[in-house]
Amino acid sequence: TEIAKTVPQTVDKEELKPGDLVFFSTLGRKYINHVGVYLGDGSFAHASIKKGVTVSTLLDGYYSKTWRKGGRVE
């Protein structure tokens, strides 16, 4: 949550570039608790409890529903 609050630039999903951060709220909408790094073409890398470091897509129903914002650090 703190990283999401302090990211210098908020980015819409359609404007993401490789290297941008992607933030999710996977425990309900109370706060952001999951972050990944956007890779391009709708994919992002993140750490999963079940799979370790993995690559997922923003189009996935789960991540599409839990998406909160993108952020850019330049």
Image (cartoon, rainbow, N blue to C red):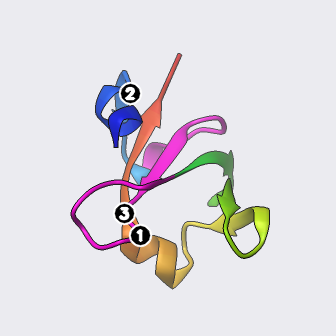
SS for tag 2?
A: loop
Q: Which mark is residue 7?
A: 2
Disc 1 designates what residue?
Answer: 26
Image spot of residue 2 (x, y percent): 34, 35
Q: Amino acid at mark 1?
A: Thr
SS for tag 3?
A: loop
Work out how far the residue at label 2 is from the one at label 3, CA to CA, in angstroms: 16 Å
Outermost residue to the bottom: 61
Count how many numbered circles sit on residues in the image. Answer: 3
Q: Which mark is residue 56?
A: none
- Magenta run includes residue 19: yes
**For the stretch drawn in magenta, what is the main secondary structure?**
loop
Image spot of residue 23 (x, y percent): 44, 51
Q: Dots 1 and 2: beta carbons under 8 Å? A: no
Query: In this picture, which residue range is highlighted in magenta?
Result: 14-34
Q: Dots 3 and 1: beta carbons under 8 Å? A: yes
Q: Tell me: 36 left or right of 12.
A: right
Q: Residue at x 59, y 38 (%)?
A: 17
* Mark toward the start of the polypeptide (1 vs 2): 2
